[in-house]
Structure formats: structure tokens, C-alpha cells
Amino acid sequence: MEEISKSPVSDVPTLADVAARAGVSTATVSRCLNTPDRVTEKTLKTVMDAVNHLGYAPNYSARALAAGRTNMIGAIIPTMENAIFARGIQAFQEELQKNGCTLLVASSSYRQDLEEEQIRTLTARGADALLLIGYQRDPQIYEFLKKRKIPAVLTWASEPSQNFLSVGFDNRKAMKELATDVIGKGHRTIGCISADTATNDRARERVEGIWAAMRDAGLEPDTLQVVETAYSIENGEAAFQQLMSGANPPTAVMCGNDVLAVGALRAAADLGLKVPDDVAITGFDNIELAFVAPVPLTTVHVPHRRMGQLAARALIEALHGRSPESVELPTEVRHRNTL
Amino acid sequence: MEEISKSPVSDVPTLADVAARAGVSTATVSRCLNTPDRVTEKTLKTVMDAVNHLGYAPNYSARALAAGRTNMIGAIIPTMENAIFARGIQAFQEELQKNGCTLLVASSSYRQDLEEEQIRTLTARGADALLLIGYQRDPQIYEFLKKRKIPAVLTWASEPSQNFLSVGFDNRKAMKELATDVIGKGHRTIGCISADTATNDRARERVEGIWAAMRDAGLEPDTLQVVETAYSIENGEAAFQQLMSGANPPTAVMCGNDVLAVGALRAAADLGLKVPDDVAITGFDNIELAFVAPVPLTTVHVPHRRMGQLAARALIEALHGRSPESVELPTEVRHRNTL
DNA sequence: TTGTAGGCGTTATCAA
DNA sequence: TTGATAACGCCTACAA
């Protein structure tokens, strides 16, 4: 990595320039910009005229340094590639913007070590607050954030201990509800395609939700055939094939998300299996893919946009020194044609 | 919008703290961090020990203020909601990260006025460089960037005049190629569902590509039936219905992107039309949706990830004071089952 | 190789 | 209501 050198500074106007032109002090200009009510209407006008004339825009680095606050909020998400997080983050960003904050993003590629690195990077960059996905991470990270007094909101999950601010939903409950429906349809041999349950709390809770439903129905949870794989259509296909070629192929395959489910759907078609007659398949998230799929997917609807919006509000609240409450959003089984 | 007040500053270590602990000056610490080669191995070790012990992390606001550079690069995209931009932006971010830069994002909701506002915001926030989508915008913006000496790369398009740095592809050529195939299949009555051609250069060029192919084939371009609408599956459905209920329903409907095409596909199914027998439908972008669609979509493949990566590199080059060349990436018609 | 010291553009405290 | 002025944390000539 080489040094980046900046070309000779272009002369962008500063507070001092505005002050000079308006014939006031820089302090007054600053007030006009930040607390207009603490200034005479007349001086305000004079100053704003100067601002407009010069095309002045504040230097946020300087402002951040002086004020100890950047108005930037960071979000670290596993990936930007699929619609799962995109919708929520889009809403998050819109809400931030309404409140004068800018979004700083980083992606962790579903890796905990990278996430930790990103957290340090974004905080060093001055992120005033952070949006994180899920709750499972090294306790040191939480200590770090606490020590630095950086509010964080955990999303796409409901933090069980309630020790942290979270705006999300109960993955376990949501999946249990769907699993109960699956079992209600008479399925007794069930398969599951999941993301890595060791590091991904959302994935783990979803699997646990299936187990819970099985127990409630008097089924032996151990009979759930779980295949763990990374989220992608291709992996969903492979996992489905693996499940169906086993000794005791499931009659229903519950997938950790819609992307995997679409893969399963394709694999089923390749195997000549009719969905849902030969095999039932379910998803999770209710992204576009779900209702555009070859067979419209029965899945769990998650209020992504609302979650992003509320997460932003919670963080803004926290930055205002208030103590926002965690919120658990409702999810809802969306019945379509694969169950 | 209310003031955000920060809680009493948590004591995060500063350069001075490190210097004190290592028994050197702040200048030396700064050198250890930025130009390790200009420092004794011994002092480097002493200093780095202190850094680690204190858990020091640089304050980027201060650094930015002093150095006149933030190492943040902004991207303003029409929307983060769908996969069209997500894949490219993800790659862009990954490449930035490799080079020590952080991504700042804003979305313009496909509105030129908002985009302009975002450009000003991100530059005020200190973005060293910018990624923009398309090339059509108020010339004043380009002047503004030039005056501020902020490198910008135009993407998802090839800037025709070659006056600006761009890393993208030729929308016109790409769509012309696809249209030529459509015509080659014998279609003479063609429809087109496009985004707003007045403000969206990519959309406009794609339509022009169809016209060009028609002219080459001796067809009258005016006979192309164009419906303009915002990108969404629902709008694609509505537009398709509108086209098919016209006096002279097309036998082929070329869509401005895959999202619209999927909508068209659904509408066709609702109307009881077989694709491609009764009507051909094409997309653009080749996002996941395209090959998962009820009928796998014939579309134009765009190298999104490569584009994002090269755009990042171009910007980094520019920040190093070099003059990167624009690059036009090849696209390629992906034949599947809807034509 | 290292230290000194000025300055980057704002904010915010304190007087006036 | 306004104006001086001291931070804010770091970088970088310039000296030593």
C-alpha cells in the first residue's frame, strides 16, 4: 500500500472566509450554522448570504475533531451481495440521512475476525454508533464498545439476554412457527439446510426453532437432518441433493433462508421431484427471490425495512443521550406454494 | 432535527499518550505509524509496544484535518435495494479495503437533485474520491468536482465523450447485440419496458441500442413500443399488460433490466401466454433473479464485480496522482429460455 | 534519526 | 447577541 498524496490544496472556502466576508467572527458564523436561534435575524442573513456567495461547505473533519462527534454511523454486515441485508440497510440509511447522519459500511464476509477488525476500523474512523448483525461475538468487543461509549444496535435477531440494545426479531420463534406448520402438514422426516450454526446465531436459532417444534409435536429432534453450508443458490442445490441421496430422504426440507431454498427448488426440479407433492421446501426472509421462484416459496416474512428504520432511530436516540428500548418485530409465515 | 450531544469523552489514548509512554516525541510516533522506514528499528519496537499496550488507534478526524485527506471514498448509487448495484458495490468496497480506504455510501433514489445533494454532502464529509453511476448530470457538478480536485469514476456506463474517467460498459452496444438476436429470431413487432429515458442514461442508451438494431435490420425504429416506468417487478407486470393490451401487441418485449423482465414474465403467465412461444421476453444485468426466474431469462451479462474492483483501482490510482485510463468492459448476451 | 512547533477548520468557553 | 481564544489530535516542514 502506497502513500496517497493529495494534489496542491484547492482553495475551498473556510469559516474564516465567510466570517471575513460577513464582517463577523468565526464564532458567529459557526452559530449561524449550528444554532441559528442564538443569533440575530439580521446577522443570520448577512452570514448566510456570505455562505451562499462563497459556496461554503463545512469541513467535517475539523468539525468532528472539535466537536468530538462525526455524525457518521457505521454498519457492518456479512455481505452486501444479496437482498437479505440490502433492503434493511437501505432503510437504515434513509432514516439516518433524515437525521443528518451518514452511513459508513463495511462487510465482514460472515467472518467473525473480520467483523472485529471492521468494528475497530469504523470506530477509529469516528463512527458515533454502530449497527451490527446478530449478537454472537467475542465479549471483548462489547467491552471495547462500552469503554469507548459507542452505542451499538444488534439487528436481524433478538438478543436473548436483553443486555444489549437490539432491534430485530426472534429467529427461533419465527422458524418454530413455520416448522409447526410443516409438521402440521404431516411431515415426519425433515431436513434442514442451514448456514454455519457455530458462528451464525441467526442460523443456529432457526435450527433450534425446528427442534422446538419437533419436540412439541412429539418428534425426536435428533432425527432432523441438518446440512450446513454457506448461503448461495449453488450451495442450496448441493445440500439438497445430499439430503435426498441419504438413507432416509426427508419429505420436507426447511432452508435457513430464501437463497438456499431457491437452490433446493432447482435441485428438486433437476431430480424430477415435484414441489410440494414429492417434497416440501421452505425458506426464510421473504426476499424478492421467494415469490419469483419457479414455485413461489413458502417462507417467513421479515420486516426488513421497518427494522432498518427503527434501528436507525434507536441509535439516534442513544446519541441524544436517551435510552432507547430494544424492539422485537413480529415475523409472519407467508404461505405460498412449496408446502 | 435535534442536537446530538456526546456523553463525557471516554479517555481514548492519543498520540501524545503513546509518545509519553515510549519516551519519544509525538512526531516520532507519527512516523512509526505512517513511515516506519524512516525510523530506527529499535524505536519502532518501543513505540509499537506502547501502541499495543495502550490500545491506541489513530483519530481519523484529526488525521484527516492535518493531512487534508480522509482515505474515505464515496459512492452514490440509485438504490441499494436490488442486486443490480449491490454486487458491484460489494466488490468496490472489498478493493477499497485492501487499499486502506473506507466506503461512504449514499443513495439517490434515482433522483438527480438528490444525487447532487449527496455529492455535496459526501465531499463535505471529506470523501477523497467518488464513484458515480452513469454520466448524465448537471455540468456544474463536474465543475464542482474538478474545482475541488476530487477524482470521480463513472460506472455502469461508458462515458461517450471520454472526457471523464469511466469504468463501465456500453449500454447501447450491449442492448443492440441482444436486439439483433431478437430480430434474428424473426420478431418484427417489438415492445420495450424501460426506466425513465430522460434522466437515466443507461436506460436511454439501451433503448437506443434497440433502435439501432432495428435500423440495421431495415425495421422502422418508430414502431418500437416503449413504456417507461420505474424499476420494480410490479411495474414490469403493469407495463407488460399495457403493451399486450395495445392495438398491436408485440411478439417480443425487451426489458431495461432483469427486475422488469421478471415482472413481465409474471404478467405473461397471468395472461396465459407461453414464453417464448407466444411472446419473447429479455432482461438486462444477469442478476440472480434472471436464472431463477420461472423461465430462465435471456439477458445481457454484465461483469459487475470486475467493474466494482476496477473502479476502485482507478480511483486509488487517481489519488496517487496518476492518470488511470477509462475501461470499457465487455458484456455478453446470455441465452436462456425466454427468447 | 529525532524533536520542536505551527497549523489544519471547527467548536465551545468565557468575557464583553 | 457577539467576539477572542483555547482546545481537538495529528501531520510535517524545519532544526537539531
Image: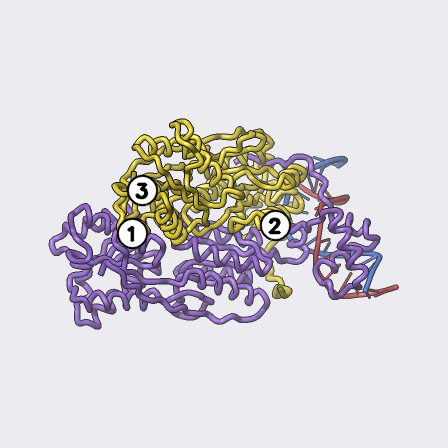
Chain colours: A yellow, B purple, C blue, D red
Observer able to see residue B112: no
Number of marks: 3
Q: Which of the marked residues, 2 or 1, is nearer the chain's N terminus?
A: 2
Residue at disc 2, secondary structure: helix
Disc 1 from disc 3: Cα separation: 18 Å
Taking the view exactly as shown, the residue that stands out farthest to the left is B247
Q: Chain of mark 2?
A: A
Q: Is residue B281 left or right of residue A27?
A: left
The image position of residue D15, as x and y in percent, is 84, 65
Observer able to see residue B84: yes
State the residue at coordinates (23%, 57%).
Answer: B281
The image position of residue A240, as x and y in percent, is 37, 48
**Amino acid residing under circle 1:** Leu
Q: Which of the marked residues, 3 or 2, is nearer the chain's N terminus?
A: 2
The image position of residue B252, as x and y in percent, is 19, 59
Characterize the local packing of mark 2: few (<14), some (14-19) or many (20 or more) Cα atoms within 10 angstroms. Answer: few
Disc 3 from disc 2: Cα separation: 37 Å
Disc 2 from disc 1: Cα separation: 43 Å
Q: Which of the marked residues, 1 or 3, is nearer the chain's N terminus?
A: 1
Taking the view exactly as shown, the residue that stands out farthest to the front is A247
Q: Give the residue pinned by disc 1.
A: A271
Mark carried by residue A117: 2
State the residue at coordinates (22%, 61%).
Answer: B339
Of tags 3 and 2, which is closer to the observer?
A: 3
Characterize the local packing of mark 3: few (<14), some (14-19) or many (20 or more) Cα atoms within 10 angstroms. Answer: many
**Does the CB distance between marks 2 and 1 fall below 8 Å?**
no
Q: Does label 2 lie on the same chain as label 3?
A: yes
Q: Is residue B4 left or right of residue C7?
A: left
Of tags 2 and 1, which is closer to the observer?
A: 1
